[in-house]
Amino acid sequence: MEKLWTTSEVAQYLGLTESEVEGLVRDGKLTGYKLGGKFLRFRPEQVQALKPTLSIQRTAPVQVAMAGAVSWPERLRDFLYFYDLYLVSFVLLAGLVVYLVASG
């Protein structure tokens, strides 16, 4: 079974962004296959055949969002949102260990 390429692999190979690759799929220039109804995959030979036909001219350089532009309260909020279960579990286990050591 052949290995299908991800959107990021295709973007890297073609020198495009992932959204530009998705645009090629929307325009019908590239066939993408959805796995699990969400993840696009591509046949390498189709991507390799498409590369010589691409003539995308960029008028402005691609701008990447600056990671440093996020304030520390926003980072803390995101951290607590994504890791709240682990933090609560740690506190409960630490409390249980302290209780067992103190009573033992």
Image: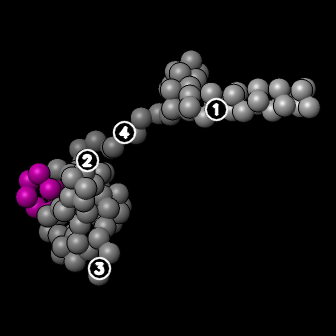
User: What whole-number distance in Å separates the C-alpha atoms at marks 3 and 1?
Assistant: 42 Å
- Helix or strand or loop: what does disc 2 sit on? helix
**Drawn side of residue 52 relative to residue 66, left or right:** left
Dot placed on the residue nearer the N-terminal end, 2 or 1:
2
- Check disc 4 and report the residue beneath it: 63
- Helix or strand or loop: what does disc 3 sit on? loop
Look at the image and give the residue range highlighted in magenta. Answer: 24-30
- Check disc 3 and report the residue beneath it: 2
Location of the N terminus by quadrant is: bottom left
- Check disc 2 and report the residue beneath it: 19
- Check disc 1 and report the residue beneath it: 89
Residue that sits furthest to the front in the current view? 104
Dot placed on the residue nearer the N-terminal end, 4 or 3:
3
Q: Which residue type does callout 3 highlight? A: Glu
Q: Quadrant of residue 10?
A: bottom left
Residue drawn at (32%, 62%) of the image: 6
